[in-house]
Amino acid sequence: MIDIVASGVLFDMDGTLVDSTAIVEGAWGRFGAQHDIAPSTILAFSHGRQTIDTVRHFLPDLDPTEQRRLADELVADEVENTHGIIEIPGAAAFVRRLVEADVPVALVTSAPRDLALNRMRAAGVDVPEAVVTSEDVEHGKPHPDGYVRGAALLGLRAEECVAFEDAPAGLQAAVDSGATTVVVGELEDDVTIGLARVHGFDGIEVSAEDGTFRLRG
């Protein structure tokens, strides 16, 4: 249950608005097989983080140019693969309700722009006018840069916004930005303690109130 008053909404993408689990698991599974790393170990770290940060974490001794090449290959493969991508329950309708209520909305994702736009469109979720991707920040999640920038694009401070996130790295970034943070899904982690939670977006009501809005559900 949530009952939140804010001035803007900041959304993560994968696992929050879009379910691309099969594609992500397949890509990191192939990477793990090539480098003798258990896919489960990679996925436990990678969720919510930029691809290059994951490659650097697991292959720290690799030449930086080669790290970047591997990351670019992984991303290029995922950009073209949209098979099976679906929305998180109620996500598309919820984003539309926010926009129709003139609520400022930003997407804040660790994915590159092309990948993010392809996945949102494949899932049928409208892309907000304000978008922050991996190309737009110096430090990826769990650093709060992305959420601070997303709020600024809306003309707001992060403290005036509510952020929806599903992954430990992203949740830490949202919390550290000062945004009111809502967990999407089943994750139980130290960072989720005390946070509001939703399991989808069906039934969340949006009402505008003099420059702010209220979410109830």
Image: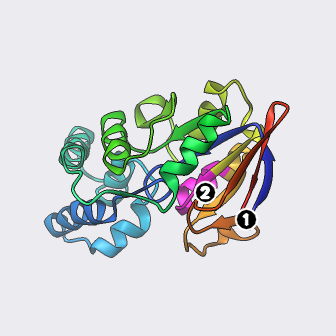
Measuring 72% from the left and 64% from the top, which residue is drawn there?
A: 196
**Label 1 neighbour load within 10 Å: few <14, some 14-19, many 20+:** few
Residue tagged 2: 171
Seen in the picture, residue 211 relative to 87 is either above or below; the reply is: above
Q: Which of marks 2 and 1 is in front?
A: 1
Q: Dot 2: what SS?
A: helix
Question: Relative to 126, does residue 88 appear above or below in the rendering?
Answer: below
**Residue that protrudes farthest toward the right in the picture:** 210
Q: Can you identify the residue that label 1 sits on?
A: 195
The residue at the point 40 percent across, 47 percent down is 50
Residue placed most toward the observer, 4 or 74: 4
Amino acid type assigned to the residue bearing label 1 in the image: Leu
- The structure's colour scheme is rainbow
* Quadrant showing the C terminus: bottom right
Q: Estimate the spatial distance between the alpha carbons at disc 2 and disc 1, rounded to whole Å.
A: 10 Å
Is residue 177 in view?
A: yes
Residue at the spot 73% in from the left edge and 29% down from the top edge: 156
Residue kind at label 2, given as amino acid type? Leu
Residue 170 in which image quadrant? bottom right
**Pointers 2 and 1 in contact (CB under 8 A)?**
yes
The answer to whether residue 101 is left or right of residue 81 is right
- Which x, y percent locates residue 141? 52, 48
